[in-house]
Structures are given as C-alpha cells and as structure tokens.
Amino acid sequence: MGQRTGPLATLAFLLAAAIAASACAPAASPAASSPQAAKTKIVIAVQPTATPETLSANAKELDEFLEKRLGREVELVFPTTFAGVVESLRFGHAHAAFMSAWPARLAWKVAGADVGLAEVREVVIGQDKKEETFYFSYWIVKKDSPITKLEELRGKRVAFPSQLSTSGYVAPLARLVDLGLVAKPAPGKEADPKTFFGQVAFAGGYQQGWEALKAGQVDAAIIAGDVPEALYREVLASTKVIDQQGPIPSHGVAFAKQLDAETKQQLKDALLELGKTEHRPLMRKGIAPIGRIAALTVRRA
C-alpha cells in the first residue's frame, strides 16, 4: 500500500500557507468580556465539525460535566474556522482547544500551545480494527481501473473530501509533494494539486467522494481508516488501493501557553475522566468526532 511517512514531517511544508491564513482570520473573542471573567471562567474552543448552532446545543451536557469537575464556569465556543481556533489560543481568548492534527500542529507552531492530550479512537488499519491515536488514509481507484500507482493519476480526475481534512487532503497532498508529483510551494503559498491532476473536486465528505468514484465521475478518491467501519470496509471491498499516507495523528487537545500549570492539570484530569467508558458517549455528543482521550507529551523543538 505504499511507504509510510511521518505525519508531522510531511505536513510541515504546508504550515506557511496555514500561518498566513490564520494571521488574516478574525480572532474569536468570547472570553474577552472582562479581566475578571478571564480569571474565573475556562474557555475551550472547538474546531468546527458542524454548524456552531448544532455544536452549541450538543455541548451543553459536556459543559455541565466540566463545570462540576472544575468547580468553575466553563464555556465552549465554536469559531467558524480552524484558524479562528488557533488565534483564540494565540491571543489568550481560549484556554484550551479541541483540534484535528494539522490545526493542532499549527497551534503548537504559531501560538506556542502545548498539545497535551491525544484522542484514542477506534480505527481500521489495513483490515484490522484497533484503538489508536493514529490512522492511515488511502488512495483508491475502481477495481477494474488500469491505474496501479499515484504517478499514473497525472491528468486524471480526483475527488478529495474537503480542503480542511487532514487525512483527506493535507496528508494526501503532502504525499504528492514527497513523491515530487506536486511542487513544494514557496513560503506563503499553497501546494496546488491542479498542477498534477486534470480535474480536482472537493466532494464534501468521504461518502460523497466514494459515490463520485462509483459513478465514474472521478478516477480516484481518498478513504481514511477513521471513517465509520461499515463505509471503510464497503469502499475497500469495492476498490483498489494504490497508495497510502500516514500514520496520521488523531485529534488532540491544545492548551494555551498563558494557562497556569495548576489550571492546566485540573483541566487535563477532567478531560481524561471523559475517556472512561461511562463518559465516552458524552464526549462524542459534545465534540464529535472526538472519542476518548489519553495523555500525550509533546515538547517544543
């Protein structure tokens, strides 16, 4: 299924473009109402995975759980972009954030955030179902396709799930750069898959990309080991894998550098408690798709 590449190394070249995007994005400011509020209230920013209205409604129970454990007010906020989450940490408007791998790396790089907890999720690696803090994503073509390797996709049609997807776009694009199929971008610029493919589509999700491949609308698509197992196995049973990228880190929890050590530890302990079996549904409901979380030590270079 192709060679494995280190996720932080392969994604690093895209940071310049992300930094530029985050610098231009408006910072979320829900915690900036007063200095006193900043001392008494814990603000947690959540990378958007649905509409802010939906997330806010689903997060109520999680909010109450954390307030009870911490003995202080907790507010979950939902910036409209991942750049807004990074900026919330950078300027101290949020004390912690739930983020996917690429934005978490960006928060570490740009905002000096400490990525202190990692999600443990149920994934499928190859054909094996596991619980890990990482997974892989795969380039797929139809079973009867003559295409057998990425190089043969030059000039072809491809469907990515989303430009914001770490496993569905950022890591696959990094793989193309690693292989020299797409040029490494200049500082402040983004790698452009259109220089290699004849047509690039963003389907809106893995299911939609699979439907486009089935319908013959594209020649290749991406599937990841962290999608629902039924979808993953359906796709792999009906397609041919021509390459892969990973291991790709799962979601994580980043803590703002301004957060004091005592509060950080209290928040870590409360979040780790959510990883226990009886609380896991609450975590999934509040901040989908995060499941349970485990301690992770990440030091700045």
Image (spheres, rainbow, N blue to C red):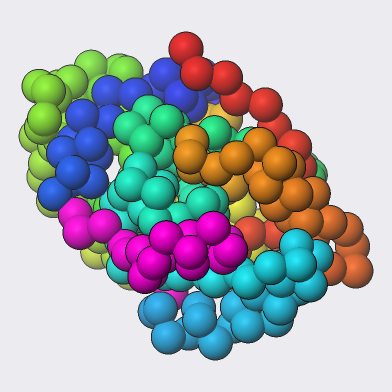
Looking at the picture, how far across and down is residue 183, in whole percent? Answer: 15, 22
Q: Residue at x 13, y 49 (%)?
A: 24
Q: Position of residue 111 (x, y in %)?
A: 37, 36
Above or below: residue 186 compared with residue 166: above
Q: Out of 267 and 81, give the one closest to the viewer.
A: 267
Q: Which residues are magenta?
A: 25-50
Give coordinates of residue 256: x percent, y percent: 49, 42
Residue 116 screen position, x and y as percent: 64, 36
In the image, is 95 to the left or to the right of 139? right
Q: Is residue 233 left or right of residue 54?
A: right
Q: State yes or no: residue 47 in magenta.
A: yes
Q: Residue furthest front?
A: 36
Q: Which residue is found at the position 63% from the left and 83% from the top?
A: 60
Question: Horizontal placement of 288 versus 92: left or right?
Answer: right
Q: Specify whether residue 56 is painted magenta.
A: no
**Residue at the (26%, 57%) spot, across then down:** 27
Q: Nearer the viewer, residue 1 or 92?
A: 92
- From what the image shows, is residue 81 above or below residue 261? below
* Residue 216 visible in image: no
- The quadrant the N terminus occupies is top right
Q: Does 280 appear above or below 154? A: below
User: Which residue lies at the image location 60% right of the left edge and 40% below the top edge?
Assistant: 260
Q: How many marks?
A: 0
Report the front residue among 36 and 138.
36
Observer-nearest residue: 150 or 299?
A: 299
Residue 78 visible in the current orientation:
yes
Q: Residue pushed farthest top?
A: 301
